[in-house]
Image (spheres, rainbow, N blue to C red):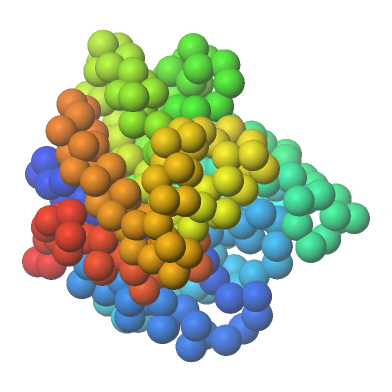
Amino acid sequence: MSRLKELLEKKTFVVTAECGPPKGADKGIIEKKGGFLKGYVDAVNVTDNQTSIVRMSSIAACCILKQLGIEPIMQMTTRDRNRIAIQSDIFGAYALGIENILCLSGDHQKLGNHPQARNVFDLDSIQLIQTVKIMRDEGKVLGGDSIEGIPKMFIGAVENPFADPFEFRLSRLSKKIRAGAEFIQTQCIFNLEKFKRFMEGIVEKGLSEKAYILAGITPLKSAAMANYIKNSVAGMDVPDEIITRLKGVAKEKQKEEGIEICVETIEEIKKIEGVAGIHIMAIEWEEVVSLIVKRANLKISLS
């Protein structure tokens, strides 16, 4: 059984983090990042060719983390696989001991280092969630054949509380939960007031009783990074006061200020009804996760 699922069922306030695989076959990079995270988080997401840039496969990187004693969450996008490859990879991942899956559509290939590639999108993210649930609960593949060795995956999905239109977010989240999503990791939270309104809607609709909501957090390294996210990353919401605050300190101290903002945000999120945990997306800054966990007084279950 997924240890992450077990902790959430026990009402443990969990902490997960994101780990980006290398742009190559150097397993030492995953081992190094795993070393930064081990003992500080309950589980680690491994991204699947994020931003459409070719990297080590999520399955392989998850296996390396598992060998280090770290609970992996395999991210899977539908961008690069049809339903045959998707189901085949789920079989293989579960056979290798990977018990958590996060279902996504994936960034468009034009954003990455192979803009000429053909995307697939045979299934969308909601259909991927349904596929994993059918495989697990009905013991069948989409074509109807019975499965020899059922993958008992703990199923996750993502939601962005800040993408427009705001009112559509709860509807889309409801669809994902109805499809089978059991835990949800949100997009990075910089606008706390908007996230609070999002969570109020979740609680009112009873969705936090049907799926575990993990709040996404990203530490900002600089005012320039905050500006870039605000102006160049679709669906992101960075309030001007955060950028002003970062600009208000010397450039060499902006990383420390970004960490402090991150910790303060976590402290506020812990008070919000319906939040079951924190998901830290440090974006190639995995070494700072342990510091954030300590300063935010997040307690990790190591049993």
Work out whether residue 168 or residue 258 is closer to the camera in this orientation and state it. 258
Residue under the image location 34 percent in, 63 percent down: 256
Residue farthest to the right? Answer: 116
Query: Which quadrant of the rendered structure holds the C terminus?
Result: bottom left
Can residue 79 be seen? Answer: yes
The answer, for residue 131, to whether it is visible in the render is no
Quadrant for residue 116, please give it.
Answer: bottom right
171, 151: nearer the viewer = 171
Residue 173: which quarter of the image? top left
Instruction: Please state the horizontal and vertical placement of residue 257, each as a whole percent of the image.
Output: 34, 57
Classify the position of the N terminus by image quarter: bottom left
Picture coordinates of residue 247 (x, y %)?
47, 51
Instruction: Left or right? Give the position of 200 relative to 237.
Output: left
Note whether 247 is above or below 184 in the view shown: below
Q: Kindly identify the residue that appears in the image at 33 percent across and 80 percent down.
A: 35
- Residue 81: x and y in percent read 70, 51
For the point 64% across and 70% down, which residue is it? 55
Left or right for 212, reference 89: left
176 versus 11 height, above or below: above
Locate residue 206, reporting x and y percent.
25, 16
Please give the name of the residue rendered at 34% of the width and 69% of the height, measured from the top-left corner. Answer: 288
Q: Is residue 254 above or below residue 146?
A: below
Residue 193 quadrant: top left
Viewed as shown, does residue 165 lie left or right of 161? Answer: right
